[in-house]
Amino acid sequence: MRRISTLLVTCFCIITSISAQNLTKLGVNGVKLRNFGEIIQNEEIKGYYYFYQLEASGKNSLYQLAVLDENLREINSIEIIKPKWYFLIDGAFNEDAFGFLFYDAKARSTELITFDKTLKETGSLITKVADGLSSSIYTSTMRGMDMGYTLLSAVPHQGFILYTYPKGYKYQVEFYDNSAKMLWSDKAVENKVDVQIADEAFQTEEYIGSLISHKKSLLSNDLDYNLMIHEVKTGKQLFNIPIEDEKFNLSASNIFYEEASHTITIFGEFFELDSKEYKSQGLGFFYKILDMEGHLIRDKFITWQSDIAKVTKVDSKGRIDGKTRVLFHEVFKTADGEMFAIGEQYKKGVSAAGIAASALGGGIAVMQLEIYDMVIFHFGADLSIKEVNFFDKDKSIMTLPQGYSYISAKKLSYLAKIMGAFDYKFSQISKEKNSFVATYIDYDKEKGEKAKNVFGAIVYTPEKTFTTDKIVLNRQSTNYFVRRAKPGYVMVSEYFKKEKKLDVRLEKINF
């Protein structure tokens, strides 16, 4: 599943230096986690786009939208006048055109604008935002949180898929061409289920796959999943089937379309039949392989107790060494059919500061979520577990607000991910799909030395071995962000509040 990470630059800025692999701006008044995104083509980073405010006047502001190449050289840019409370929520590139989804916070409306490769506008559509899920997602995204839902996706050469919620908490899938003209749409089935959320599963020039999660209410811990497939050209729904099993409750996390075999692979966790995903720990992992009519070809269940315990020390509830659990961030399938699930270890812990404050009548919570090492599960092409690899990093802590102590560790891990508390940053697979890199930030604390921020990269090489690299982020910046970049590199953005400067550069990953 594709997810575009972005960086919002709210500023009055002057470009002072642009050279290969480096870009610097002065006069930057602040940065937030939005509005700077990657341009991806054939699994590779081919450039970036950014959107920022130049100047404000009355109710409107002057903005600049620009496109950079993979070496951070500016290719095209345009200036547009839009309302003062105007934010870029999501962007996509389908190899022929750009699609950008903007949110006007004051008018409570969205605007989908399409551009060709030269940033010539080709179409636009303004839509009023309904109360409910859309409003919550846009507001949270504007504030820098990652709700985990896809809004805009690129369909190669064809157009863009937009996921909306025109009736509160029920999805609508809309397909637009490169001129922002709607060609077809499909909406949720009306039934007793109050919440039906659609997220991207995959897109090809022929098919659009969507993962549908549904539950009886927003606060329910009991989720069910469907897989829905559409034909791109006609909008015909090929099928919309439940992801289920007679013996277990299933939670789907990743879906892969195989062009050669014309099949779909569903990967996720499985639970006891009466267990709830947000409150219960899974029994292990499952695969289901379907044909393009939705019929089951093959499935497999891999348990913590019987299978994974053979390659690492883990109990029946998925606790490694009887202590920490794993939150998975990304799953990759390599060209040889093997799969890798990338995650981080975590557990609920007791806050010493919270206990002390509580004894004195303070308002600090006693519990905290503790985040530990990176971990990668390696599955073979035969769907069996091969090995579990651990990569050391220092412990991170998320202090829990009062009242959160009674929430399950599993649900807390989902909340922590939305709030950006985990150290994982991104993963990127090579064009050949024979290697990938998984990255994280480590607040490294060496004995006798001042703590420093370190960018860590875990690389799975074409030779099928793991190697690691670390880059010390020793600049005295107020904030920094890391992004995907061209093969062998990572993009680092640093903001210096005192100098009002934004520095963007490419760093080499050694492996």
Image (spheres, helix red, strand yellow):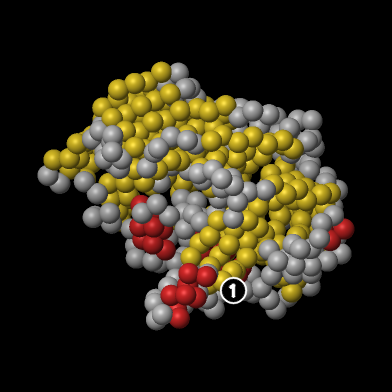
**Residue 222 locus on image (x, y percent):** 60, 74
**Residue 221 locus on image (x, y percent):** 57, 74
359 over 396 or under it: above or below: below
Badge 1 marks a residue whose secondary structure is loop
73 over 377 or under it: above or below: above
Q: Is residue 42 left or right of residue 136?
A: right
**Residue 182 locus on image (x, y percent):** 42, 45
Residue 64 picture quarter: top left
Residue that sits furthest to the top in the current view: 19
Q: Give the amino acid type for the residue marked by disc 1 in the picture.
A: Ser
335 over 193 or under it: above or below: above
Q: Is residue 391 left or right of residue 33?
A: right
Viewer-nearest residue: 135 or 164: 135
At horizontal 53% and vertical 60% (from top left) the residue drawn is 397
Residue 183 seen from this side = no
Name the residue tied to disc 1. 408
